[in-house]
Amino acid sequence: MSESDHADPVRDTALPEAGPSKVEVPLEELETLMAEVCTAAGLAEDESGQVVRHYLAGELRGSPSHGIAKFAFESRFFPDRQASPEVIREQGVFVIVDAHREIGPLSAAFAVRAAVERARRYGAGLVGMINTQRYGILADWSEAIAQHGLIGIATNTSRADAVAAGGRTPVVGVNPLSFALPTLDQPLTADMGTTLAPMGVLWEHRRSGLPLPPGCFVDAQGQPSTDPKEAVSAVVFGEHRGFAISLLLQALAGSLFGFPMGRDVEGTYSTGYALIALDPDFTDPNHKAAAANTRLVEQLRAACTTDGDTWRLPGEQARVLAAAARAAGVVEIPEQVLARLRARAAGDFTSD
């Protein structure tokens, strides 16, 4: 089963990425290489800028499985794009988009615009999208919605790559979730997966041969495995509670829009995406949700842990990591990822 058959691996910054050795690459050099890849794939300059920014954001924010490595893999399919995304059905707050195999960050941006437009008009916008290439971190899209003063939600289905704790037969997907709440400053953002580790970790560990993180994957018999050659499924977090959340997300990005779910998701282009925008001020113009959310953030910051420290809010670490990386001007990536990136920039869209 190839990586191209799988939906987005979910984000988990706590897990180390695979790689026998790493090298520091100047940020400017990475941006140039990624832009060259896009040019070789036939993207226009403005399209290239959007794609590079998105995948680079994943890398800088501490999610390598959604950063340069994923760009190097997903760029293999950039030449497969057929046409611009198209709204094929709409009614009230609902919109269904056929992305025509558009490159993930470009189709997601289209869906975000459609969700925001509906939320401005009706108070809510629920956009389902299918037949698209994949993108990286979901937080980019929930935050893009929140920047308009709206609550942003992003999720998607995937192939049946995940099992509940104690399970053997995969039925649900990795089903990630991101939401962002508007504040008077930066959005309060969460970006999480419903499995203990991203499937992207499995793919990179298969390339490197390094053992998998314990307890995160199982083999075909449902037994925990750290062998990347034997492991086939990711384990859903939180036992039955996490499994229930995964089912809800599956329905939001699946049956709500008539998209495939479970084992009916055959690959990338049958994966369903949901981009949701909600206007918290729609019913009461005097309600100021951004201010209310800011007060909530202040209360959270004032809360203490049992050891007297303060809470770390969702999204904070990612922003700190991104700022530090930009200040340093260098990014550390596996040598094998850099080699794949250079191959793409030279016009090689077939090797892995």
Image (cartoon, helix red, strand yellow):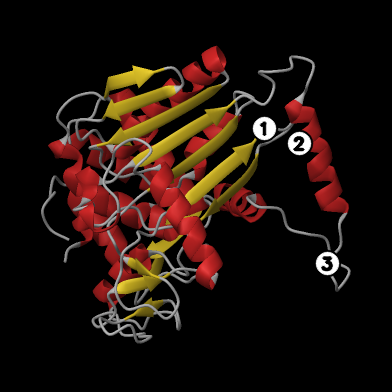
* Residue at mark 1: 182
Q: Is residue 98 above or below residue 172?
A: above
The quarter holding residue 161 reads bottom left
Spatial distance from mark 2 to mark 1, Cα to Cα? Answer: 7 Å
Q: Position of residue 235 (x, y in %)?
A: 42, 72
Mark closest to the chain's N terminus, 2 or 1: 1
User: Quick one: SS at disc 3?
Assistant: loop
User: Quick one: SS at disc 2?
Assistant: helix
Q: Position of residue 125 (x, y in %)?
A: 49, 25
Instruction: Check whether the beta carbons of the residues at disc 2 and disc 1 lie within 8 A of each other.
Output: yes
Work out whether residue 87 or residue 180 is closer to the camera in this orientation and state it: 87
Spatial distance from mark 3 to mark 2, Cα to Cα? Answer: 21 Å
Disc 3 crowd, CA 10 A, few/some/many (<14, 14-19, 20+): few
Mark closest to the chain's N terminus, 1 or 3: 1
The mark found on residue 305 in the picture is 3
Q: Name the amino acid type tagged 3.
A: Thr
The mark found on residue 293 in the picture is 2
Spatial distance from mark 1 to mark 3, Cα to Cα? Answer: 25 Å
Query: What's the residue at 45%, 77% (across, down)?
Result: 165
The mark found on residue 214 in the picture is none
The quarter holding residue 95 reads top left
Q: Is residue 346 above or below residue 153?
A: below
Query: What's the residue at 38%, 18% (across, down)?
Result: 91
Query: What's the residue at 13%, 45% (across, down)?
Result: 347
In the shown orientation, is residue 281 left or right of residue 93? right
